[in-house]
Image: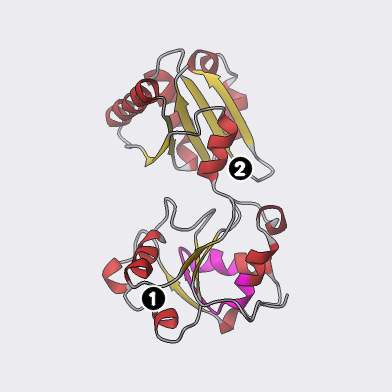
Amino acid sequence: MEGNKTMDAALYLIPVTLGGDDVNRVLPGYNLDVVCSIRHFIVENVRSARRFLKLVDKSIDIDGLTFQELNEHTDLASISHYLDPLEKQGESIGVISEAGCPAVADPGAAVVDMAQRKNLRVVPLVGPSSIIMAVMASGFSGQSFAFNGYLPIKDGERSSKIRKLEGRAWSEGQTQLFIEAPYRNGKMFSAIVAACRGDTRLCIAAGLTTKQEWIRTKSISEWKKFPLQKLEEAISKVPAIFLLYRG
């Protein structure tokens, strides 16, 4: 694939797939041209980033690229040089997350903040966002919604947080979104149905854009009657977003 040689230098925020390998299904051709034009990348995980780049174009010379890792373990005091190719050499840099859009519920936000403070050009590219797609498919309010990330792991603290989010959904008419590690999805579901009132609605959006995609919206009372085995088959070890809204 030929790169876009006239592309303006910038920090490009490059979305990736949410788990599937079909980049043509979820990413526009322009993105792929941008990717092929960039030699410097800031990534959440080097191995998965290299794999994504090979999916985009098998002819990419991976060894000719530079990678800087930025994830939850990175000391932010050590990343001041990450933008040097753009700031000092005028060469574009791409930011790649593990899944979906970089800088949204993602460590990449730190380098975007740094670029904005330095008045460098930042260009977000179009791509799949599990947060937005879950809201779209839930049937809940898209006028007002909040993403709350991970909830507390301890049972009591988690149940308290779920009830607070439920209260906000009812009092403010605001859709509440949160996530869990895929292997704990079942425990999260159990905590939600135990903590919430029967007429509160819960949407589970799992495996978005992949062959495992599974999206259901039901009241808590209805979820309590849902076949547990069928639910486990759909969400066990699959990335999922949980959404709460008033009945």
**Amino acid under disc 2:** Leu
Of all residues, the one furthest to the bottom in this rendering is 89
Q: Which mark is residue 208?
A: 2
- 139 or 161, nearer to the observer: 139
Pick whichever, 83 or 73, lies toward us: 83
Identify the residue shown where x is 59% and y is 56%: 126
Which region shows up in magenta?
A: 34-51
Amino acid at circle 1 = Tyr
Residue 95 position within the rendered picture, expressed as x and y whole percent measured from the top left: 49, 66
Residue 147 vertical position relative to residue 92 in the rendered view, above or below: above
Instruction: Write down the residue under mark 1.
Output: 82
Q: Residue 30 has which mark?
A: none
Residue 124 counted in the magenta span: no
In the rendered structure, does residue 38 fall within the stretch colored magenta?
yes
Question: What residue is at 51 percent from the left and 15 percent from the top?
Answer: 224
Spot occupied by residue 175 in the image (x, y as percentages of width and height): 44, 30
What distance separates the C-alpha of mark 1 from that of mark 2?
31 Å
Residue ID at (61%, 55%): 17
